[in-house]
Image: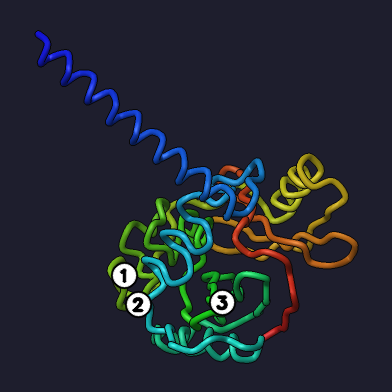
Amino acid sequence: MAMKTRMIVSLGAALLVGALALSTVSGAFAQTRPTPVPGGMMGGGGVMGGGGVMGGGGMMGFGPGAQAAPLQSLDSAQQAFQRYIDSTGNSDLALDEVMQFQWNYYAIVKEQSTGIGAIELLADPRNGSVFPEMGPNMMWNTRYSPMATLGGGMMGGMVPGGMMSGTWGPTAPTTQPSVTAEQAQQFAQQWLDQYQPGSATETPDAFAGYYTVHITSGGQVSGMLSINAYTGQVWFHTWHGTFVTSSEA
């Protein structure tokens, strides 16, 4: 009986130590991640946050567009994005816009045949690696995302040569979106009115399964939101940091 009691006490102590360690790690993590903003499905530096599991240089950061050289300018980032696109072998994909933020470079890639957004890419300025953007681009994209749930399936093929890639190319969604671009902009503005009063939205960029809009404050870009084209859910991009500059490709 005494031995059983000692075992229970030891187990309890071990669990307490584990809980304290987890609390310490979580606290440190919270202090180094962007401040959580309501409405983001994985907002606030979650598993998909910049530099996390799917972040720069992370699990999805070793695609054919990776390079071992820092990106010093918007032009060098544009070249890195173009190399990534060229490596896919899909001649219908074209670079549309490149933006520089505090923590990464961002690019919109569109289908030339439709004019619709295909994928969103990020580049890590520290090492030049190019990878698919986390968040809506991975979870809501119904044509190119390997994690798409409406027609794309787990083998949609967004990362050529990657462990989750199938064949690089679009897969047809099974249902039509129920949210229009105008409605998406309204949903985005309602979210901003609640969480970032005084901010406004630009015209949405349409992707398969969702929209992405630039947030403006005082006439300057201040961030991004994505809106699900089937549910109207709003997802705030927490992983960019402060906007620096942009250019049309």
Which mark is on residue 45? none
Crowd band around label 3 with a 10 angstrom C-alpha radius: few (<14), some (14–19), many (20+) = many
Amino acid carrying mark 2 in the image? Pro
Above or below 45: residue 145: below
The foreground one among 180 and 205 is 205
Is label 2 in contact with label 3 (beta carbons under 8 Å)?
no
Task: Calculate the distance from the C-alpha at mark 2 to the C-alpha at mark 3.
Answer: 15 Å
Residue 11: image x %, image y %? 22, 25
The residue tagged 1 is 165
Amino acid carrying mark 3 in the image? Val
Which mark is on residue 160? 2
* Residue 104 as seen in the image, left or right of residue 7: right
* Residue 40 as seen in the image, left or right of residue 222: left
In what quadrant of the picture does the C terminus appear? bottom right
Residue 170 can be seen, yes or no: no
Crowd band around label 1 with a 10 angstrom C-alpha radius: few (<14), some (14–19), many (20+) = some
Residue 221: image x %, image y %? 79, 66
Q: Residue furthest right?
A: 218
* Residue 143 as seen in the image, left or right of residue 168: right
Is label 1 in contact with label 2 (beta carbons under 8 Å)?
yes
Quadrant for residue 13, please give it. Answer: top left
Q: Earlier in the sequence, mark 3 or mark 1?
A: 3
The residue tagged 3 is 109
Quadrant for residue 32, please give it. Answer: bottom right
The foreground one among 27 and 156 is 27
